[in-house]
Structure formats: C-alpha cells, structure tokens
Image: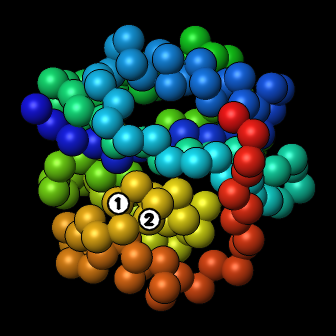
C-alpha cells in the first residue's frame, strides 16, 4: 500500500461543494482517505487578481503507482470542470500530489515531492495539521520546520464551516 499526501483546492463556483466532490471522487477512484485537514482559505498565490481559494490536505492509502494516481487525479479534475486556460489561473478544482511515500520522482509528467510546496503557506499550513513531523525526502526537514522557514507572506485562514 502506498501513502500519498494530496492538496486539493479551488476558487471558482461553489468551492466547498467542489472540494467535497473531489474528496468523494478520490475515495471512489484513488484510494482510502486516512486523514483530512481542516478547510483553509487564502488569497490566490502567483496570479493574485482572482478570488480566494479554499484548500485542504489529505493523506490517502492507494494501491496505484504515483503516475497512475496522477492520471486518476487529472481525470477527477476534468470531471469537475477544471480548465487549464491560464497558468496559475482560477479553477474549479486543483489536486496535487505533494508526497508519495518517501519517493523522489522527476520525469516529464510528475515531480514529487511537489517542487514548490516548501515555498507556499497554503500548502504547508494544512499539511502541518495532518503531518507535522513528516520529513521531506529531499530536504530531510519536517513539514513543521519547512513552515517555520517559509518566507511566503500570504495569510492562510482556517475556516469554521464544513
């Protein structure tokens, strides 16, 4: 069984409904969800002229390889109306693999651990909630340490409603 940490997020349409549907689809097609973080809201990162995002981190157990999992996640994004019109643009749903076991994968289709995760509070804050001591396989630092060293000034707000 493989363990994968995912980040899901979106900023178009009914953000909460989109995240919930992504979670349902992940359960059906990708694997068993072991942990789910709280909901977090943050301003858009990179292309800031768009609505705020809701994000959650997940830990799943899966029988799929990393590449198979990525294909499944892309299909889920497509089912939920994801359009890739503008880099870092608005989206109904985005599902990223942050970690896959302790693997380091760099090929044309996949980059694990996620290449920019250590630079982004909106990834690190929910990830620290569910896996504070998990060690980044390249930096050999915990998620908590990565968050404490992160220079991203984007605020991440925990949401109450579910």
Asked whether residue 111 is in view, the answer is: no
- At label 1, counting other C-alpha atoms closer than 10 Å, the crowd grade (few under 14, some 14-19, many 20 or more) is many
Marks 1 and 2: CB-CB under 8 Å?
yes
Question: Height in image: 129 above or below 89?
Answer: below
Side of 109 where 78 appears, left or right? right
Residue in the image at 22% along x and 28% along y: 62
- At label 2, counting other C-alpha atoms closer than 10 Å, the crowd grade (few under 14, some 14-19, many 20 or more) is some
Residue in the image at 40% along x and 76% along y: 144
Asked whether residue 42 is in view, the answer is: yes
Question: Height in image: 104 above or below 80?
Answer: below
**What mark, if any, has residue 131 been given in the picture?**
1
Q: CA distance from mark 1 to mark 2?
A: 5 Å
The outermost residue toward the front is: 160
The outermost residue toward the left is: 1
Side of 41 where 152 appears, left or right? left
Name the foreground residue: 6 vs 86: 6
Residue in the image at 17% along x and 31% along y: 65
Circle 2 is placed at which residue position?
128
Q: Secondary structure at mark 2?
A: helix
């Amino acid at each position: 069984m493989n363990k994968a940490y995912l980040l899901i997020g979106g900023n178009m349409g009914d953000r909460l409904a989109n995240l919930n549907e992504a979670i349902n689809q992940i359960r059906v097609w990708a694997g068993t969800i072991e942990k789910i973080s709280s909901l977090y809201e943050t301003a858009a990162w990179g292309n800031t002229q768009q609505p705020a995002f809701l994000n959650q981190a997940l830990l799943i157990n899966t029988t799929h390889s990393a590449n198979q999992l990525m294909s499944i996640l892309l299909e889920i994004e497509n089912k939920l109306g994801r359009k890739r019109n503008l880099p870092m643009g608005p989206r109904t749903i985005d599902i990223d693999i942050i970690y896959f076991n302790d693997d380091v994968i760099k090929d044309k289709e996949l980059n694990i651990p996620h290449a920019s995760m250590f630079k982004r509070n909106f990834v690190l804050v929910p990830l620290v909630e569910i896996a504070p001591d998990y060690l980044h396989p390249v930096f050999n630092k915990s998620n908590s340490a990565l968050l404490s060293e992160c220079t991203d000034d984007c605020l991440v707000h925990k949401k109450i409603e579910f």
